[in-house]
Image: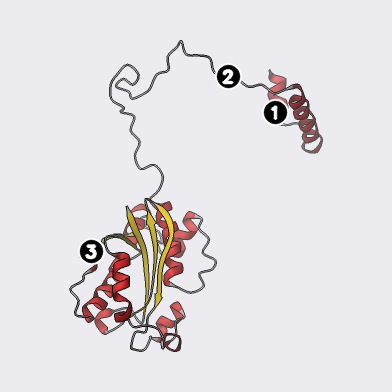
Amino acid sequence: MRQIVLDTETTGIDPNEGHRIIEIGCVEVVERELTGRNYHVYINPEREVEAEAITVHGITNEFLADKPRFADIADEFFEFIKGAELVIHNAAFDVGFMDSEFARLKSSRKTADHCGIVDSLAIARKKHPGQKNNLDALCKRYGIDNSSRDLHGALLDAEILADVYLLMTGGQTALSLDAGSGDEGGADGIRRISADRAPLAVPRASDDEAAAHDEFMAMMEKQAGETVWSKLSAAE
């Protein structure tokens, strides 16, 4: 399965009020492995970026002045995401902006018609009900280093979200002991080992290894007092 972990930065919060995308960051994941293939672009929104938005992502109007317009990158962006499953934190926000941008080009493209959409925020809320589930909180919960995230950035946030998503959805999802019936399994799903099997090899320490171990334990007891090992040895 090909997945694209995606994030955007925008001029404001509502595309219905004319706000636009100013940055897109995408990270490709194939069969739950990061491929190293990314897509990243800054975009001239052809309008002012709101001051409140700049405090969030730090992307200024001056910086965007010489960047390409969405119309200039629309085709290459669409080709990168087409057919993939998009993983987005609070997907309705980003997809709403993407669809609004495509609509401005008089295009019939709608994201959901060409891509699957997975909302990682919805997954987090289901997995961790009643807790904070923003990206910073999830990084802390899953032990992901986000110390470089002073401001929001589409590519950085997509890279972080990819790690969060893979950890949040990884691991064993189901445990089944029902392996069917048969001589080895039976109804309980336990595979029985034949009683006449060859004995398991039990490696033992050499004389030199045993002497080194005794020397080490003597040093430990001198520093810390009686050890659990010496108590067990005495009990035997």
Q: CA distance from mark 3 to mark 2?
A: 57 Å
Q: Nearer the viewer, residue 127 or 163?
A: 163
The colour scheme used to paint the residues is: secondary structure
Tag 1 or tag 2, which sits nearer the N-term?
2
Q: Amino acid at mark 1?
A: Trp
The residue beneath circle 2 is 201
The percent position of residue 92, horizontal first and vertical second, equals: 28, 68
SS category of the residue bearing label 3: helix
Q: Nearer the viewer, residue 44 or 92?
A: 44
Tag 1 or tag 3, which sits nearer the N-term?
3
Tell me if mark 1 has few (under 14), some (14-19) or many (20+) residues whose alpha carbon lies within 10 angstroms of its own.
Answer: few
Taking 146 as reference, is 37 left or right?
left
Q: Amino acid at mark 2?
A: Ala
Q: CA distance from mark 2 to mark 1?
A: 24 Å
Q: Amino acid at mark 3?
A: His
Q: How many marks?
A: 3
Q: Quadrant of residue 28?
A: bottom left
Position of the C terminus, as image quadrant, is top right
SS category of the residue bearing label 1: helix
Q: Quadrant of residue 204?
A: top right
Residue appearing at x 47%, y 54% in the figure: 142
SS category of the residue bearing label 2: loop
The percent position of residue 143, horizontal first and vertical second, equals: 51, 55
Q: Nearer the viewer, residue 221 or 174?
A: 174
Query: For the residues carrying marks 2 and 1, which lies nearer the camera in this image?
Result: 2
In the displayed structure, 33 sits above or below 179; it is below
The residue beneath circle 3 is 114
The residue beneath circle 1 is 229
Query: For the residues carrying marks 3 and 1, which lies nearer the camera in this image?
Result: 3
